[in-house]
Amino acid sequence: MEILVIGANGQIGKQVVQILKQEGKHEVKAMVRNENQIEEFESMGIKAVLADLEDSVEFLSEVFKGCDAIIFAAGSGGSTGPDKTLLVDLDGAVKTMEAAQEAEVERYIMVSALQANNRENWNPVLKPYYVAKHYADRILEQSELNYTIVRPGRLLNEAGTGKIKAGIELERSSIPREDVARTLVAAIDNHHTFRKSFDLTSGELDIKIALKKL
Amino acid sequence: MEILVIGANGQIGKQVVQILKQEGKHEVKAMVRNENQIEEFESMGIKAVLADLEDSVEFLSEVFKGCDAIIFAAGSGGSTGPDKTLLVDLDGAVKTMEAAQEAEVERYIMVSALQANNRENWNPVLKPYYVAKHYADRILEQSELNYTIVRPGRLLNEAGTGKIKAGIELERSSIPREDVARTLVAAIDNHHTFRKSFDLTSGELDIKIALKKL
């Protein structure tokens, strides 16, 4: 399969790309926003393509053609203004879903945020970000795409442990970005994750086993 | 019918309440955000209720019980920050839809913005506001509610003419708030507007006739 990683230069995206490259099971293509990043990826032997979430659905759909799966790991991150949150995390994300459908990419894996589905549990400090993620996820769940929505807890930079907890309503907790990246990659062709949404934190089960229990 | 007006103290909402009161065909209830406004409406003989779009769906649903139709005329207006846009125009609006369904209010009329349905035609200056309105409208169209989405052009404070243009894809133009308010009221029990979304500007047809052509 050819996997397109959106937000490939982000902290999770970079690790997804590297894991895919190391595993060598799938082809990987990095979607990035500037020429320097293209060169950076290509110098590592990774295909890269230039596109922006503020581009049109038509343009994005051209970029997506020929891919078999999309991993959406882009994000304004909640630290930029809420205008960017609206344009990137919500409308940008939904445009990629529409483009994926136009380009007949069936598989779509979204990085969301712990309990984005549950208004009552939104982190009050990041509320506008949660609103954007919530509605992007809702639109994805209503789409025809074969989606997986992964909702990680607080993201850490430390090394992964390969041990996770995946479930419908997990308590607020943290997880290394590396383990999120490994979970996203493991989900690609794992039927237990098809058309499912789940919270993700550090835990006690191997990724494969945790996903099997979904 | 009992009509609940959300954003009853806003520039369009106030006129909707007054027109409903003058016509006397329906009962009207004003939903407002502070005690002073309650007194103001009650002094004019209009029922009023205290609630906020940042309240929970459960609370809103209690407020809505017994109403037959909701007119959503609230709005951050695009002049507040985009964080409010996310919380009021998008999540606040969707909470009222969920609450309406819980309270078994079947009819729901939304004030949107010209071409909010068409990304290509969004006013670049107000883009985050358009994103919020777009997704609120999309969720409403996918709901079980008997909706009407009215998408007026640039809003003017001058007196209404009673003459409008209503259609699927109108050119950018303006309309007095009074004519928007009259159109919302005329839509309440007008079958031609059920489960429809349309642009609205000043035009040449009487409101009733323009709605009949939808």
Image (tube, coloured by chain):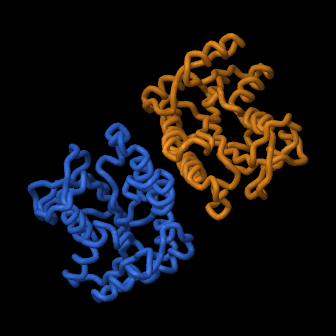
Chain colours: A blue, B orange
In the displayed structure image, the side of residue A59 where residue B77 appears, left or right: right
Residue for point 54% across, 26% down = B64
Q: Quadrant of residue A25?
A: bottom left
In the displayed structure image, the side of residue A188 where residue B98 appears, left or right: right
Asked if residue A31 is positioned above or below residue A210 in the image, the reply reads: below
Q: How many marks?
A: 0
For the residue pair A169 and B106, the one nearer the viewer reads as A169
Residue farthest right in this picture? B204
Asked if residue B103 is positioned above or below residue B167 in the image, the reply reads: above
Residue farthest front in this picture? A36
In the displayed structure image, the side of residue A184 where residue B99 appears, left or right: right
Residue for point 44% across, 74% down = A33
Asked if residue A188 is positioned above or below residue A200 in the image, the reply reads: below
Residue for point 74% across, 28% down = B15
For the residue pair A90 and A145, the one nearer the viewer reads as A90
Specify whether residue A1 is in view: no
Look at the image and tell me in which quarter the N terminus of chain A lies.
Answer: bottom left
Residue for point 87% across, 48% down = B203
Q: Position of residue B111 (x, y in %)?
A: 66, 41
Q: Position of residue B34 (x, y in %)?
A: 55, 20
Look at the image and tell me in which quarter the C terminus of chain A lies.
Answer: bottom left
Specify whether residue A133 is in view: yes
Q: Position of residue B6 (x, y in %)?
A: 60, 30
Q: Quadrant of residue B4?
A: top right
Q: Position of residue A123 (x, y in %)?
A: 33, 42
